[in-house]
Image (cartoon, rainbow, N blue to C red):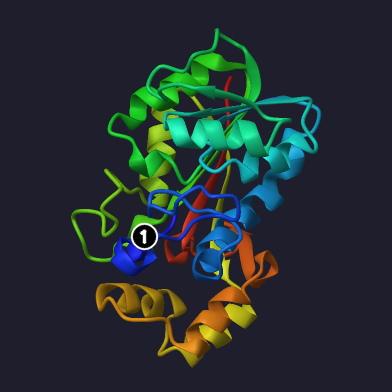
Protein backbone atom coordinates (compact mmCIF):
# COMPACT_ATOMS: atom_id res chain seq x y z
CA UNK A 1 0.00 0.00 0.00
CA UNK A 2 1.33 3.40 -0.91
CA UNK A 3 0.64 6.75 0.68
CA UNK A 4 -2.34 8.72 -0.58
CA UNK A 5 -0.08 10.56 -2.99
CA UNK A 6 -1.83 8.92 -5.93
CA UNK A 7 -5.16 10.60 -5.39
CA UNK A 8 -3.67 13.27 -7.63
CA UNK A 9 -5.54 13.08 -10.99
CA UNK A 10 -2.26 13.48 -12.87
CA UNK A 11 -1.11 10.16 -11.35
CA UNK A 12 -4.30 8.23 -12.04
CA UNK A 13 -3.09 7.00 -15.44
CA UNK A 14 0.12 5.53 -14.04
CA UNK A 15 0.41 1.77 -14.21
CA UNK A 16 2.97 -0.95 -13.72
CA UNK A 17 5.11 -2.06 -16.61
CA UNK A 18 2.47 -4.49 -17.84
CA UNK A 19 -0.61 -2.41 -17.18
CA UNK A 20 -1.98 -2.88 -13.63
CA UNK A 21 -3.25 0.60 -12.73
CA UNK A 22 -1.85 2.51 -9.78
CA UNK A 23 -4.91 3.40 -7.73
CA UNK A 24 -3.31 4.48 -4.45
CA UNK A 25 -4.69 1.38 -2.73
CA UNK A 26 -1.66 -0.79 -3.55
CA UNK A 27 1.92 -0.26 -4.62
CA UNK A 28 3.31 -1.53 -7.91
CA UNK A 29 6.87 -2.01 -9.17
CA UNK A 30 8.51 -0.33 -12.12
CA UNK A 31 7.40 3.27 -11.60
CA UNK A 32 9.77 6.07 -10.64
CA UNK A 33 6.94 7.98 -8.95
CA UNK A 34 6.02 4.98 -6.78
CA UNK A 35 9.53 3.74 -6.10
CA UNK A 36 9.92 5.00 -2.53
CA UNK A 37 6.79 3.16 -1.34
CA UNK A 38 7.60 0.06 -3.38
CA UNK A 39 11.10 -0.25 -1.86
CA UNK A 40 9.76 0.42 1.63
CA UNK A 41 7.48 -2.59 1.19
CA UNK A 42 10.00 -4.76 -0.63
CA UNK A 43 12.56 -4.54 2.19
CA UNK A 44 10.17 -6.39 4.53
CA UNK A 45 9.82 -9.27 2.06
CA UNK A 46 13.61 -9.45 1.81
CA UNK A 47 14.07 -9.41 5.58
CA UNK A 48 11.53 -12.17 6.30
CA UNK A 49 11.94 -14.25 3.14
CA UNK A 50 13.82 -17.13 4.75
CA UNK A 51 10.96 -17.64 7.20
CA UNK A 52 9.04 -18.93 4.17
CA UNK A 53 11.72 -21.33 2.90
CA UNK A 54 10.40 -24.82 2.03
CA UNK A 55 6.98 -23.99 3.48
CA UNK A 56 3.43 -23.72 2.19
CA UNK A 57 2.66 -20.00 2.25
CA UNK A 58 -0.52 -17.97 1.89
CA UNK A 59 -0.12 -14.32 1.01
CA UNK A 60 -3.43 -12.84 2.13
CA UNK A 61 -3.90 -9.63 0.17
CA UNK A 62 -1.25 -10.20 -2.48
CA UNK A 63 -2.00 -7.10 -4.55
CA UNK A 64 0.23 -6.76 -7.62
CA UNK A 65 1.87 -10.09 -6.81
CA UNK A 66 5.55 -9.17 -6.82
CA UNK A 67 5.90 -10.23 -3.19
CA UNK A 68 4.19 -13.60 -3.67
CA UNK A 69 6.48 -14.24 -6.60
CA UNK A 70 9.53 -13.36 -4.50
CA UNK A 71 8.36 -15.81 -1.84
CA UNK A 72 7.80 -18.46 -4.52
CA UNK A 73 11.54 -18.45 -5.11
CA UNK A 74 12.12 -20.10 -1.70
CA UNK A 75 8.78 -21.62 -0.63
CA UNK A 76 7.46 -25.08 -1.41
CA UNK A 77 4.13 -23.62 -2.58
CA UNK A 78 2.66 -20.10 -2.57
CA UNK A 79 -1.04 -19.29 -2.62
CA UNK A 80 -1.91 -15.70 -3.45
CA UNK A 81 -5.29 -14.34 -2.38
CA UNK A 82 -6.91 -11.06 -3.34
CA UNK A 83 -10.47 -9.78 -3.66
CA UNK A 84 -9.85 -7.59 -6.72
CA UNK A 85 -10.60 -9.13 -10.14
CA UNK A 86 -7.94 -7.15 -11.97
CA UNK A 87 -5.24 -8.03 -9.45
CA UNK A 88 -6.10 -11.74 -9.64
CA UNK A 89 -5.95 -11.72 -13.45
CA UNK A 90 -2.72 -9.74 -13.40
CA UNK A 91 -0.95 -12.13 -11.02
CA UNK A 92 -2.09 -15.19 -12.96
CA UNK A 93 -0.71 -13.71 -16.18
CA UNK A 94 2.53 -12.27 -14.84
CA UNK A 95 3.54 -14.63 -12.01
CA UNK A 96 2.63 -18.18 -13.05
CA UNK A 97 4.43 -19.85 -10.15
CA UNK A 98 1.94 -18.25 -7.72
CA UNK A 99 -1.25 -20.25 -7.13
CA UNK A 100 -3.49 -17.19 -7.38
CA UNK A 101 -7.02 -17.29 -6.01
CA UNK A 102 -9.84 -14.82 -5.48
CA UNK A 103 -11.50 -14.50 -2.12
CA UNK A 104 -12.47 -12.41 0.88
CA UNK A 105 -9.93 -12.06 3.68
CA UNK A 106 -12.76 -12.12 6.22
CA UNK A 107 -13.43 -15.76 5.27
CA UNK A 108 -10.23 -17.32 3.96
CA UNK A 109 -11.10 -19.98 1.35
CA UNK A 110 -8.80 -22.61 2.87
CA UNK A 111 -9.28 -25.51 5.24
CA UNK A 112 -8.14 -25.61 8.84
CA UNK A 113 -4.37 -26.03 9.22
CA UNK A 114 -3.78 -25.71 5.49
CA UNK A 115 -0.59 -23.61 5.48
CA UNK A 116 2.66 -23.12 7.37
CA UNK A 117 2.94 -19.33 6.95
CA UNK A 118 0.50 -16.48 6.35
CA UNK A 119 2.03 -13.30 4.93
CA UNK A 120 0.01 -10.11 5.31
CA UNK A 121 2.00 -7.01 4.42
CA UNK A 122 0.43 -3.54 4.36
CA UNK A 123 -3.11 -4.96 4.33
CA UNK A 124 -4.51 -5.13 7.89
CA UNK A 125 -5.00 -1.33 7.95
CA UNK A 126 -7.50 -1.69 5.07
CA UNK A 127 -9.78 -4.17 6.82
CA UNK A 128 -12.95 -3.34 8.73
CA UNK A 129 -12.93 -6.43 10.95
CA UNK A 130 -9.29 -6.89 11.76
CA UNK A 131 -9.91 -9.33 14.60
CA UNK A 132 -11.94 -11.65 12.40
CA UNK A 133 -9.16 -11.72 9.82
CA UNK A 134 -6.51 -12.56 12.41
CA UNK A 135 -8.78 -15.31 13.77
CA UNK A 136 -8.99 -16.68 10.23
CA UNK A 137 -5.19 -16.64 9.97
CA UNK A 138 -4.99 -18.70 13.16
CA UNK A 139 -7.53 -21.15 11.74
CA UNK A 140 -5.72 -21.84 8.45
CA UNK A 141 -2.27 -22.08 10.06
CA UNK A 142 -0.84 -25.36 11.27
CA UNK A 143 0.36 -25.57 14.89
CA UNK A 144 3.58 -23.53 15.28
CA UNK A 145 2.78 -21.78 12.00
CA UNK A 146 3.83 -18.17 11.43
CA UNK A 147 1.85 -15.02 10.75
CA UNK A 148 4.12 -12.37 9.22
CA UNK A 149 2.42 -8.98 9.24
CA UNK A 150 3.43 -5.41 8.43
CA UNK A 151 1.44 -2.21 8.70
CA UNK A 152 2.09 1.54 8.85
CA UNK A 153 2.85 2.75 12.36
CA UNK A 154 -0.10 4.99 13.25
CA UNK A 155 2.07 7.23 15.41
CA UNK A 156 4.29 8.31 12.52
CA UNK A 157 1.98 7.67 9.55
CA UNK A 158 -1.01 9.71 10.76
CA UNK A 159 0.49 11.74 13.61
CA UNK A 160 -1.94 13.46 15.91
CA UNK A 161 -5.01 12.22 14.04
CA UNK A 162 -8.01 10.21 15.19
CA UNK A 163 -8.64 8.96 11.66
CA UNK A 164 -6.10 7.68 9.10
CA UNK A 165 -4.56 10.20 6.75
CA UNK A 166 -4.86 7.67 3.92
CA UNK A 167 -8.46 7.44 2.64
CA UNK A 168 -8.03 3.72 1.87
CA UNK A 169 -7.25 2.87 5.51
CA UNK A 170 -9.93 1.94 8.03
CA UNK A 171 -7.89 1.64 11.22
CA UNK A 172 -4.17 2.11 11.74
CA UNK A 173 -2.26 0.60 14.65
CA UNK A 174 0.67 1.35 16.89
CA UNK A 175 2.94 -1.42 18.18
CA UNK A 176 0.96 -1.99 21.37
CA UNK A 177 -2.34 -2.17 19.46
CA UNK A 178 -0.89 -4.56 16.89
CA UNK A 179 0.44 -6.78 19.67
CA UNK A 180 -2.98 -6.79 21.36
CA UNK A 181 -4.71 -7.64 18.08
CA UNK A 182 -2.47 -10.66 17.57
CA UNK A 183 -2.53 -11.94 21.14
CA UNK A 184 -6.33 -11.61 21.34
CA UNK A 185 -6.48 -14.23 18.55
CA UNK A 186 -4.15 -16.55 20.45
CA UNK A 187 -0.87 -15.72 18.73
CA UNK A 188 2.43 -15.34 20.54
CA UNK A 189 4.41 -12.37 19.22
CA UNK A 190 7.92 -13.66 18.65
CA UNK A 191 9.33 -10.39 17.31
CA UNK A 192 8.23 -6.81 16.71
CA UNK A 193 10.40 -4.94 14.24
CA UNK A 194 10.33 -1.42 12.88
CA UNK A 195 11.21 -0.01 9.47
CA UNK A 196 13.36 3.14 9.65
CA UNK A 197 15.19 5.38 7.23
CA UNK A 198 18.84 4.43 6.95
CA UNK A 199 21.68 6.97 6.58
CA UNK A 200 21.13 7.69 2.88
CA UNK A 201 17.41 8.32 3.34
CA UNK A 202 18.17 10.57 6.29
CA UNK A 203 20.31 12.59 3.88
CA UNK A 204 17.44 12.71 1.37
CA UNK A 205 15.10 13.83 4.14
CA UNK A 206 17.40 16.77 4.86
CA UNK A 207 17.62 17.59 1.15
CA UNK A 208 13.83 17.84 0.90
CA UNK A 209 12.97 20.06 3.83
CA UNK A 210 13.20 17.42 6.54
CA UNK A 211 11.11 14.63 5.01
CA UNK A 212 11.11 13.07 1.57
CA UNK A 213 7.74 11.56 2.51
CA UNK A 214 6.20 14.95 3.25
CA UNK A 215 7.71 16.33 0.04
CA UNK A 216 5.87 13.67 -1.97
CA UNK A 217 2.59 14.23 -0.11
CA UNK A 218 2.84 18.02 -0.45
CA UNK A 219 3.28 17.64 -4.21
CA UNK A 220 0.14 15.51 -4.41
CA UNK A 221 -1.97 17.77 -2.18
CA UNK A 222 -0.99 20.77 -4.32
CA UNK A 223 -1.66 18.75 -7.50
CA UNK A 224 1.80 19.87 -8.61
CA UNK A 225 4.19 18.34 -11.10
CA UNK A 226 7.19 16.43 -9.84
CA UNK A 227 10.34 18.50 -9.57
CA UNK A 228 13.29 16.90 -11.32
CA UNK A 229 15.28 16.67 -8.08
CA UNK A 230 12.48 15.05 -6.08
CA UNK A 231 11.63 12.54 -8.78
CA UNK A 232 15.29 11.60 -9.25
CA UNK A 233 15.76 11.08 -5.52
CA UNK A 234 12.57 9.03 -5.17
CA UNK A 235 13.56 6.90 -8.15
CA UNK A 236 17.00 6.26 -6.63
CA UNK A 237 15.71 4.65 -3.40
CA UNK A 238 16.66 1.00 -2.84
CA UNK A 239 15.78 -1.51 -0.15
CA UNK A 240 19.22 -1.17 1.41
CA UNK A 241 18.34 2.46 2.22
CA UNK A 242 15.93 1.21 4.92
CA UNK A 243 16.83 -0.32 8.28
CA UNK A 244 14.63 -3.03 9.81
CA UNK A 245 15.39 -3.03 13.53
CA UNK A 246 14.09 -5.02 16.49
CA UNK A 247 12.00 -3.17 19.07
CA UNK A 248 14.63 -4.04 21.68
CA UNK A 249 17.25 -2.04 19.81
CA UNK A 250 15.36 1.14 18.92
CA UNK A 251 12.16 2.88 20.01
CA UNK A 252 9.46 1.11 18.01
CA UNK A 253 7.17 4.13 18.30
CA UNK A 254 9.56 6.04 16.04
CA UNK A 255 9.34 3.49 13.23
CA UNK A 256 7.68 4.12 9.88
CA UNK A 257 6.17 0.64 9.57
CA UNK A 258 5.63 -2.15 12.08
CA UNK A 259 6.62 -5.73 11.29
CA UNK A 260 5.33 -8.53 13.49
CA UNK A 261 6.37 -12.18 13.56
CA UNK A 262 3.65 -14.12 15.40
CA UNK A 263 3.41 -17.84 16.17
CA UNK A 264 0.25 -19.91 16.32
CA UNK A 265 0.39 -22.22 19.37
Q: In this view, does 233 lie to the left or right of 55?
A: left
Residue 114 on image: x %, y %? 62, 12
Residue positioned 69% across, 39% down in the render = 69
Closer to us: 95 or 109 = 95
Residue 180 on image: x %, y %? 38, 37
Residue positioned 37% across, 81% down in the render = 225
Q: In which quarter of the image is residue 116?
A: top right
User: Where is mark 1, residue-wise?
Assistant: 12
What number of labels is visible?
1
**In the displayed image of the protein, which residue is found farthest to the top?**
111
* Few, some or many residues within 10 Å of mark 1 (<14, 14–19, 20+): few
Residue 56 visible in rendering:
yes
For label 1, the SS is loop
Residue 189 visible in rendering:
no
Residue positioned 34% across, 56% down in the render = 154
Closer to us: 199 or 12 = 12
Q: In this view, does 239 lie to the left or right of 196?
A: right
Residue 67 on image: x %, y %? 63, 44
Q: In this view, does 96 lie to the left or right of 224?
A: right
Residue 203 on image: x %, y %? 57, 87
Residue positioned 45% across, 60% down in the render = 14
Above or below, 216 relative to 194: below
Q: Quadrant of residue 237?
A: bottom right
Image quadrant in which the C terminus is located: top right
Closer to us: 42 or 89 = 89
Above or below, 100 relative to 157: above
Amino acid sequence: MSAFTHSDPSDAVLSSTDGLPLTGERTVPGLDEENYWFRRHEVVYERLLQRCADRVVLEAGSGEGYGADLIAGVARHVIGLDYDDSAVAHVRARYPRVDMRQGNLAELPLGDGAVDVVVNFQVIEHLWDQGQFVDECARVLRPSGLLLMSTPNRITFSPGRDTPINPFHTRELNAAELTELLTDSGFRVEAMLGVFHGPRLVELDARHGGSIIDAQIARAVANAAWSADLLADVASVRTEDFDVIDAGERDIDESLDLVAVAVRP
